[in-house]
Image (spheres, helix red, strand yellow):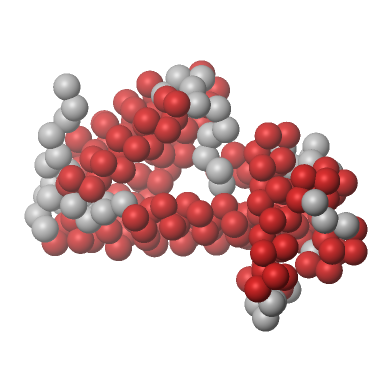
Amino acid sequence: MTAVQRSAGLTAKGARTRARIVDAAAALVHQHGVADTTVEEVKKNAGVSSSQLYHYFTDKDALVRAVLHRQTELILATQDQADLGSLAGLRAWRDGVIAHARSVSGAGGCPLGHLVGQLAETDQNARLELAEGFHRWAAVLRTALHDLDRAGDLRPGTDPDNLADTLLATLQGGLLLAQVHRDAGPLETALDTLIGLATHAPTND
């Protein structure tokens, strides 16, 4: 059963309790990693009993998959608010990503991407959940970049679908380097280079 299926049909109170558990787990996973996050810690931070937690999640693996789904939904909600279908929106999105990376000195990386190294080689179900999350993210980018192309703001010969994959890969690589170096500079350079090569957007001074 998927995270979405398990959350369907809950009462309003049940949905709030489940969300509180997932939020607590997500915060702990972000701070300590999947391996070092225990169910006992999640229960304590969420303020729930064992019976409550296991009512919604059969085991820790199911809870981790719910965290992955949560992170994907948060990313997509944020991405939907950004108007990447216009040069001004693309620039604003770029500025927001870099400003956040600077504010935390690159710590944490991507909320979804930083889990790949922890789970992709050891948990097949989690890997599939991650792959689906990135697939959905890329689809949102493709839609926006096709709008940008129709507006005549992509350089001739630039394929919006390929650009979406490249932008996502560039973002992930830039966030990873920012995390390692505790410096948003590599992320800024990577995004500005790609945007400059693919669009008619003016570069920042």
* Residue 25 horizontal/vertical position (percent): 72, 48
Up-down: is 38 above or below 193? below
* Residue 51 horizontal/vertical position (percent): 90, 64
Residue at image location 26% in from the left, 52% down from the top: 84
Q: Specify whether residue 41 is in view.
A: yes
Residue at image location 55% in from the left, 27% down from the top: 107
Up-down: is 66 above or below 4? above
Residue at image location 80% in from the left, 51% down from the top: 47
Q: To which quarter of the image does residue 10 belong?
A: bottom right
In the image, 142 versus 1, the foreground residue is 1
- Location of the N terminus (image quadrant): bottom right
Up-down: is 105 above or below 142? above
* Residue 194 horizontal/vertical position (percent): 27, 37
Q: Residue furthest bottom?
A: 9
Q: Left or right? Give the position of 63 relative to 191.
A: right
For the image shown, how many numbered marks are present on the structure? Answer: 0
Residue at image location 38% in from the left, 21% down from the top: 185
In the image, 25 versus 187, the foreground residue is 25
Q: Left or right? Give the position of 159 relative to 126.
A: left
Q: To which quarter of the image does residue 12 belong?
A: bottom right
